[in-house]
Image (cartoon, rainbow, N blue to C red):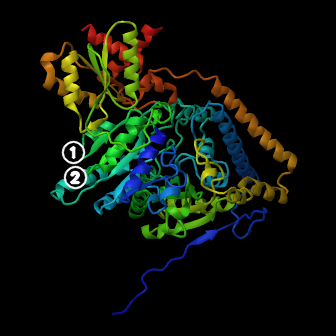
Amino acid sequence: MPVTDLVSFSVERVEVLDPEGNVDESLMPDLAADRVMELYHWMVLTRRFDERMLNLQRQGRLGTFARVTGQEAAHIGAAFALRDQDWMVPSFRETGIFLMRGMRMEHYLQYWGGDERGNVMPDGVRMLPTAVPVGTHMLHAVGLAWATRQRGEAAAVLTSFGEGATSEGDFGEAMNFAGVFQAPVVFLCQNNQWAISVPYRRQTAACTVAQKAVGYGMPGTQVDGNDVFAVYRMVNEALDRARNGGGPSLVEALTYRVTDHTTADDARRYRSEEEVELWRRLDPIDRLARYMKKQGMFDDVEEASVIAAADRQVSEAVAVFEALEPPTPEEMFAHVYAEITPPLAEQRADLLRRLEGKR
Amino acid sequence: MVQAIDQALQQEMERDPNVIVLGEDVGKDGGVFRVTDGLVERFGEERVLDTPLAESGIVGVAIGMAIAGYRPVAEIQFSGFIYPAYDQLVSHASRMRNRTRGRLTVPLVVRAPYGGGIRALEHHSESMEAIFAHVPGLKVVIPADPYEAKGLLTAAIRDPDPVVFFEPARVYRAIKTEVPEESYVIPLGTARVVREGRDLTVVAWGAQVRIALEAAERLAAEGRSDVEVIDVRTLSPFDFESVTASVIKTGRAVVVHEAPRTGGFGGEIAAQLMERAILHLEAPVRRVTGFDTVPPLAKLEDYFHPDADRVVDEIIATMEF
């Protein structure tokens, strides 16, 4: 009765840009200077917008939302590899990706300000809305991916989620369907190491999220999630493979949630400031800026002007947001069904009659 | 109410070593609403388990623990996230006793913040109690204030069957009542008369009890009608006897719930009153409810939820029928 080694696997980690701003040239993706500048612009815009959102939330002008600060490389680097015909299926922290895909900032603010009218992408943009229930949306990505392939489109789907989501049953189902269907989908795990107060170690006994790919018959890689070049490189490769009929992949971007989980959370209750500080020093934007300066792509003056331009853009959007008229109560009934049903029309009429009486 | 629930958990854990608490962020963080604050420090990680992020997992594992003789109190962080666990509740927790002819039982409590009024983001404002009350074998409890929450949760933990315990999030810190230090039980399936009256009975639960009271007081102050308010406390088992007795006395009823109108529990109450008290009714039973819409986000939330104005209007319409 021989014992045979059936399968063995290893999991690779890819790093391109180190914290000092040096790159491994052999792994550096082919990006012209203006493309690198573009990456930097989106990361800065995301950061400044996120900070402004926090400000607005503290003033009571936005509701609870999840911040993205510190994870810009993992978001922007991945979305930078998307083409217009690809789909993006986000969870609830993808502020920067929404902006990159063309959502207007004032609409994003409107949505988090408690007004559904903001929850719309410009026509033709292939991105699903924010999905608040953790881990439920990856299945939709698989369905979209199946559909694009069925129609013969050279397109792929990117879906992002946190390491907490990998504990949900739906994650396993999505990975399994993707493997079985060989769907052109890339699973991007934003492993920021904390699901509210629960650390990575309490989420899974596996050393990496990346290795979970093995069980579903697809390749899995871990990248330094604060290294925008590594994220871009591996997601780009995976999307290309998917578009060319090579099936699904899992990319784990190992990063860190330097902020609270949401504006309603207080992370000081469950983790040390030292740990957070350690990761702040690995900031993805600072790292990219160091690289660009070393390469002579820009200097302190240009850096300041990119930041100032981002701030101007954010301020303009905030001004538009603040001038928006509040929604009317009819909005609540407008999109429950394609056509309002008779009972719902009756309820709407009752409400409007009541409000009329009050005026 | 947060402290009252925390106290009930502490006292039951103290009383019965089989009582354990599990869920997302219930340990070190003390729960996102701080309901389980201090539990892990007092009872240790063996009895207060921070779980992976998986609702079906939490409830399914808790079912196994309960079958093994523990008394798990599982927390689902928001009732809007409970649906992955609905299968476990419907397919297993609710029917294990029946399937094994009483040999295996599931003395489990699933707690979840529920309902709107807290200006929350999507999936944090639902009130879907009817789809739980509809499941044979589940009990459904919704406390209206801190005193009620402590006594009802204590009863739920000691109950031999699975109980879904929905805590109105907007009541968590908004309503204060005296809560005795010592442990006490409010039996499941007993409604209470919160305010006595002669003319009409308002039936409510959870956050709507206070709104019903506000409407009743307003009508009393105006000298228009004398309204009785009943807090049903548990939707399943439902105390139809008390509600019927009240309506036989007053001859009129209005049901208030923030859940959508169609298929809401108000329909069941109206039907029961038809069957039990039709010859005593002076007017049709009317309902004040949420609309059959997705609960709107913060900006439109106040239009969705019943308020005292709407309750007053329905009471007047019923009185004038």
CB under 8 Å between discs 2 and 1: yes
Front residue of this view, candidates B26 and A309: B26
Chain under label 2?
B
Which mark is drawn over residue A267? none
Q: Position of residue B311 (x, y in %)?
A: 36, 18
Residue pointed to by mark 2: B95
**Does residue A44 appear to the left or right of A336 in the view shown?**
right
Above-or-below relation of B156 to B21: above
Looking at the image, is mark 2 or mark 1 earlier in the sequence? 2
Q: Are marks 2 and 1 on the same chain?
A: yes
Residue A243 visible, this angle: yes
Residue type for callout 1: Pro
| Local secondary structure at mark 2 | loop
Q: Residue furthest bottom?
A: A1
Above-or-below relation of A350 to B189: above
Above-or-below relation of A89 to A209: above
Residue type for callout 2: Arg
Looking at the image, which residue is at 36% across and 48% down? Answer: B110
- Numbered disc total: 2
Front residue of this view, candidates B115 and A269: A269
Q: Position of residue A349 (x, y in %)?
A: 36, 16
Looking at the image, which residue is at 60% across and 60% down? Answer: A253
Above-or-below relation of A205 to B2: below
Q: Position of residue B195 (x, y in %)?
A: 33, 21
Front residue of this view, candidates B46 and B297: B46
